[in-house]
Amino acid sequence: MDLAFTATEQAFREEVRQFLRDNVPPQISRKLVEGRKLSKDEMIAWWRTLNERGWGVSQWPEEYGGTGWTAVQHYIFKEELQMYPVVAPLAFGVSMVGPVIYTFGDAAQKKHYLPRIANVDDWWCQGFSEPGAGSDLASLNMKAECKGNRYIINGQKTWTTLAQYADMIFCLCRTDPSAKKQAGISFILVDMKSKGIIVRPIQTIDGGYEVNEVFFEDVEVPVENLVGEENKGWDYAKFLLSNERIGIARVGVSKERIRRIREVASTFESCGLSVLNDPVFSQKLAACEIELKALELTQLRVVADEGKHGNGKPNPASSVLKIKGSELQQATTELLMEVIGPFVAPFDGHSDSWTEAGDWIAQVAPSYFNNRKVSIYGGSNEIQRNIISKVVLGL
């Protein structure tokens, strides 16, 4: 594998950077640097700007609006978005349900849903996890009974990210209770405005309301909202989750956070509070940077393999990326906590003793807490180690 980017690839990187400089509102980038949340309107406006440029669904096949970029160009694009930083296109639509629809859906589903996903006319959320069916997703119980030209859905989904914004949800439902648990599951698209759906927010440890419970009581869904074949949903879910795990590595996010750690530490140094001269902290920071470089090289190997073989099958190394990527995201948020020191503790945001600087400091601890989840979603790291032992090591 050649680790050097070509002149064409370097020129492409600069093209992406220039586009970001010209089109990302400064207040959006500043919010993300400081760990703040963007509003729904801010995110949609930015994603539509990307879509107008033709980059909203860059990884899709060209016939559905994709760019036709090489695997390396896709890697560069994602990394630049993460390092700028700015939010990547809504994963639930672009990276999850979109590829399932254009791979397994029928012509009518492709025609209707794909353009709406690209332009964020529909905000999608993911209906997979249930109480008692998280990492063991195949144990799900939500039922969809086919009655004439309708499915009647009853059950509950949980940890549904950003369901409070969603227009649509893609769900795994049990359509054959007599089949073994991996079988008898179907992939169904549901309008969130349907009668019988209730969304209840779950307050997370960072104080936010990012995730929700979603209840379904006799929800009627047209049978044409079934994607692919009935009782084949488990296959489509595995296809979807393999795409999600590669994205969870988020090398650019960790690069940007290390840059932020050094920036904040240098600022504190002028007050005599910097930890950069602390040998223990310096050792931790150096270890993170070394592991991040190793992760980046691993991801580049996966990218090179994808570009070489192009068989569309998930690379089992995506499990390695998921494990190390999530661990590094957690480690860098912890290091940023150490840089801030005692000032990271909760405080009265209205106090006169705090300026705008104190305002962003208040986001550091919530970011640390929020990142505890990244080793769980997309298939817990324990599950990923099982995949590695079986598929990679052959144990």
Image (cartoon, helix red, strand yellow):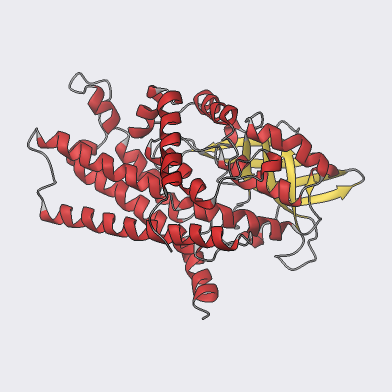
Report the residue at 46% width, 58% height from top: 322
Relative vertical location of residue 39 with respect to residue 289 in this rendering, above or below? above
Question: As rendered, which of 6 and 202 lies closer to the eye?
Answer: 6
In this rendering, position of residue 84 left or right of residue 43 = left
Question: As rendered, which of 353 and 260 lies closer to the eye?
Answer: 260
Question: As rendered, which of 327 and 209 lies closer to the eye?
Answer: 327
Question: As rendered, which of 159 and 254 lies closer to the eye?
Answer: 254
In this rendering, position of residue 7 left or right of residue 341 = right
Residue 215 lies in quadrant: top right
| Count of numbered circles in the view | 0
Residue 390 image position (x, y, % from top left): 54, 75
Residue 307 image position (x, y, % from top left): 55, 58
In this rendering, position of residue 165 left or right of residue 111 = left
Q: Residue furthest bottom?
A: 395
Report the residue at 68% width, 44% height from top: 170
Relative vertical location of residue 29 with respect to residue 144 in this rendering, above or below? above
Q: Residue furthest top?
A: 352
Relative vertical location of residue 298 with respect to residue 24 in this rendering, above or below? below
Report the residue at 45% width, 63% height from top: 320
Residue 297 image position (x, y, % from top left): 38, 59
Residue 357 lies in quadrant: top left
In this rendering, position of residue 65 left or right of residue 26 = right
In this view of the protein, can residue 302 be seen by the observer?
yes
Q: Quadrant of the N terminus?
A: bottom left
Q: Residue furthest right?
A: 148
Relative vertical location of residue 165 with respect to residue 289 in this rendering, above or below? above
Residue 165 lies in quadrant: top right
Residue 382 image position (x, y, % from top left): 47, 65
Q: Residue furthest left?
A: 272
In this view of the protein, can residue 157 be seen by the observer?
no
